[in-house]
Image (cartoon, coloured by chain):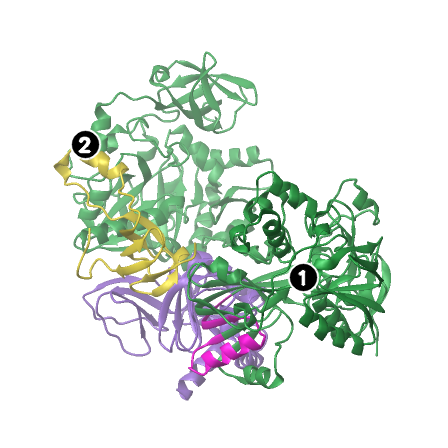
Amino acid sequence: MERQSALHHCHLDAHAQLQPFYGWQMPAWYTEPSSELEQLRGSVGISDASYLTKLDVRGPCSVSLPARLWKLTPARTLITSPLPIDLLSSSSVTDVTSTYSAILLAGPRSRDVLHKLTTLNVGEAAMPESSARQARLAHVNAIILRAEGFLILNTRDVAQHVWEALLHAGAHPFGMVAQQQWMGSTHEDA
Amino acid sequence: MSFLLKCPNCGERSVYEFRFGGEIRKRPAPGAGHDAFLHYALYKRNVAGDQWEWWYHRGGCGEWFKANRNTLTNEVRQTLLPTDEAQPG
Amino acid sequence: MEPILFTWNGNEVAAQPGDTVASALYRSGLRTFTYSYQHGRPRGLLCLTGSCPNCMVNVDGVPNVRGCTLPVRSGLSVLSQNQNVYRGFDSPAVKRFPAAPPLSESPHHYEHTYFQFDVVVVGGGPGGLEAALESASQGVQVAILEMEGALSGPASLAQKIQSHPEITTFLNCTCFGVYEGNLLGAVQINHAAPNTETLLHLRAGRVVVATGAYETQYLFAGNDLPGVMLSTAVLRLIHRHGIVPGKRAVLIGEAEPRAQFQAKLESAGVEVVGSVPIESVVRAEGADHVTGLVTDTVTYEADLVVMCGPLVSDVGLVASARGQAVSLAGAAVGEGITQRDYLLPQSAQSANAIACLCMDVTGQDVVETIAAGMGHVELIKRFTKLGKSACQGRMCQTAAIRLCSQITGQTLAQVGTTVARPPAPPVTLGALAGMRHHPVRRTPMHYQHERLGAVWMDMGEWKRPRYYGKGTPDDCVKEEYRAVRERAGVIDVSTLGKIEVKGPDAGRLLDLVFTHEFSTLPIGRIRYCVLCDELGTIVDDGTISRMDQQRYFVTTTTGNVDYVHQWLEWWTTAAGWKVTVSNLTAGLASMNLAGPLARSVLQKLTDCDLSSAAFPYMDWRQAFVAGVPATMMRIGFVGEMGWEIMVPAESGNHLWEQVLHAGAAVDLRPFGVEAQRVLRLEKKHIIVGVDTDALSNPYEAGMAWVAKLNKADFIGKVALSRLKQTPLDRMLVGFEIDGAAAPPDGSPVLVEDKPVGWATSVRYSWQKEKVIGMAWVTPAQAKGGSRITLRSDAVDYPAQVVEEVFYDPAGDRLKM
């Protein structure tokens, strides 16, 4: 049976079309994929990315795509991937896939939304592509990863709270179809 | 109070992201006796000036580090991870 | 063009585009905008810059809005108010206006935003714009905060600013303070949307204060009459609003400013009948409006008296910032301002000269205060309240200082200025609070509980079911209780802390931090754990499971997981040990399935052998439960056979549903926190923080067995060794109340009318059919059978101490 994201109830409330993605029940769209993508490209949107596998590694490690490495501190690395992660490492590894929810915040007005929720400096120079920061967002702890937008990780228990705070700050939800198109197109541009 | 504290991992952040852990003191050896432990548990030097102290970045990396702060002006002179060299206390 | 229509005290008023509420009202003929705080004196427009309190009105239910700063909008409902004070009681001032209406609940929108800039320039006038451009030319990020709706200064300058990629401009944005670490607070008002305020937090590398200079008033008898205005106000009425505020004017001030101003006034068509220095003024005359000015030589008839008042550099922000990287620019630093010394006239000391408009402090009040020995401005302020209200000293302090200097012979510097403290100008509490979107923590089964009719309780930020169902709380809790004692129940315990501790030094760390030994705990076993501080005080309790050679699983109480996590991290860091501590609380769904029929229910969901022989009490096993990989811990808090089952959070819902389904045949019930409280109380299990406090040690709590003093070292060992030898001065005991009524938790315990302690937990026990509880008492009462009395709300509850555990003292039910 498919796994359910911590935001499942938010998706039900928004009458999302739920479908399996990567073994999880995810919203494929809320209204319609192309209008969601258009809104995202012109303004700002949020999308559930909780399906990502996440590993917390203390010590050296290396991975291959599609997994990505994020340096949180000199001693601590976070690894994310849409697929299960094949990790060769003698370091201490903790699977935190279930511990963290993930919300992708993307679009040209992303920073306007973040400015309402966090004191973290999210400017281009302060937070370049592929950087990772740990800070407070909407009064809870968050890990913010800069990639095709901002990937916001929170412990699962506050996922709904953060989703609601982002909606209140002006973001609109977009589903997996738009999400995959967005990720694909930003990779092409890179 | 709204000074900035430079976390060795995360950089300068508002002091409200941190938890103060007290002045750095050495725990007595296990056999040091009751009076030594009582003194350690209850007495602080309470320096009016530069002080080495523990801080925890609870709104960030979640690590403990040491800081040298002037208790009168809140000027933070130095912060370092305990794994760094030149360890005080 | 459509006229802009709004209402003033219910009557329709027409405004023109570009009008503020104040200018529109003035245009319609209003001259008395309010009556003063203490003496009920009529007040009219004075400054038109938002500095004085005279034009304060209630707009759409929001009080104390300065009409001169609010652009007028169609449909506004504007009400008069008496100064900046809402007076709900009878007074002469209130009688002059219709009875004040109750404050209405207007929709408000308060937002917070956070920014970082290399340079923040406060003030969008010429000085500020130049400073901004200069900084931006060095390639750094610059912000300009301007309190009005547009930048002022040469148009070309403003143009450059608007198009500059490095400069961000915030309009309608008033900075109210520079705080430690160059944190600026500012409020931005959206005039297009009613009652919308945004609080900005800006961190600046450097701050430039270019707030300019403001004009302040002179002090003389009748200075507060409507029709006596500052020159700035007159110019704004004429140039911004096309309103000429009088026909015959007298000017007061220094020679040069008067001459310049006279030319401007005459070109607007006003007849200037007199122009005098302040020293020669006796008084302004008139009842509700000025009719003339009396000087020491002649009386002028006039309907407008203009003060070309002293200019004060607006340095409040710098003063309150106390020496950080803050600099001044423009008129704020005194550029272009030359001030001559002047003398206030004799009438400045009269009861008819108003020194402080906000608090209605007269010149005579100030004189009497000085005569009483308080000849320093800080003392004058505190004794008379001068400068303490809305204008924060802008309209009153300069004159008060000068008056004091004249009377006492001190220099101005000796009289001093008051300490400037933020916030100035004042900020609404709503703006400081923001949208109040508080975090809510939900377990993975949250919506299951909703569906089952949970009545919620808050535990910190967590939501937990207190009980389920629509009946009375007592009935619902009783049903849940009976299910657990007689059949089976399941409770969501996902909120309890779950911390993984692993690494070569993991065992060593746990041995040091907890009172028991854990490095010798066999793999597969679980042990109760207690954490004490160096004084031997109980900080938290839970369980620790040995998962592997170098891996342990620690559970904590709901409220203490962060503290315990930080404590473990700190000891690891301080000792330099190799341990990884991970807080996995949110990632695991956890439920406790308990009751005499629990085994039969759970066995339907798993192939794991659940018999006591194969799976004894205090063991853990990992197996598939309802098709999901799970960890089962055979522990109990409620005194019945039971298992705590943990699965990854995303499978929690599925498992919960399956447990309910499997339990349907035996009428298994979900149970909440309240039922759990009763169940555990019957077993005399303590809840840290409820039955223990910040001073409780294990000996007095009846838990001497947790302190393993033969361990080489652990936190609190030395204190506990000493405590073991020390006679106790209080003890935690169980009790039964004689009668049927239950006093609340926390009720004091008395013996012969003297307090000996307090009850920590009190509940009705369906097992004993009596009210039971736990209480702290002095050792003299600790024996079974001792008589004690609980008291609450002047009602006595006689009771008896009970030594035995109330339910299944032998603990057989747990190990079935």
Q: Which residue is mark 1?
A: C195
Q: Quadrant of residue A128?
A: bottom left
Query: What's the amino acid at mark 1?
Result: Asn
Numbered tag placed on residue C94 in the rendering: none
Query: What is the drawing colour of chain A?
Result: purple
Vertical position of residue C169 compared to residue B15: above or below: below
Q: Say how many tags the image has.
A: 2
Horizontal side of residue C111 vs C250, given as left or right: left
Q: Residue at x 48, y 33 (%)?
A: C482
The question of residue C135 being in magenta is answered with yes
- Mark 1, chain letter? C
User: Observer-nearest residue: A88 or C15?
Assistant: C15
Q: How many C-alpha atoms fall within 10 Å of the one at disc 1: few (<14), some, or many (≥20)?
A: some
Tell me, yes or no, if residue C608 can be seen here: no
Q: Nearer the viewer, residue C620 or B37?
A: B37
* Left or right of residue C304: residue C185: left
Q: In the rendering, at what x and y percent does residue C793 appear?
A: 57, 23
Label 1 to label 2: alpha-carbon separation: 62 Å
Where, by quadrant of the figure, is residue B84 drawn? bottom left
Q: Residue A21: where, in percent of width, then height?
A: 44, 72
Q: Are marks 1 and 2 on the same chain?
A: no
Disc 2 target residue: B34
Give the secondary structure at mark 1. Answer: loop
Q: In this structure image, what is the colour of chain B?
A: yellow
Farthest residue to the front: give it.
C297
Which portion, as a residue range, is magenta?
C114-142
Q: Let me know if residue C282 is in the magenta part.
A: no
Chain shown green: that is: C
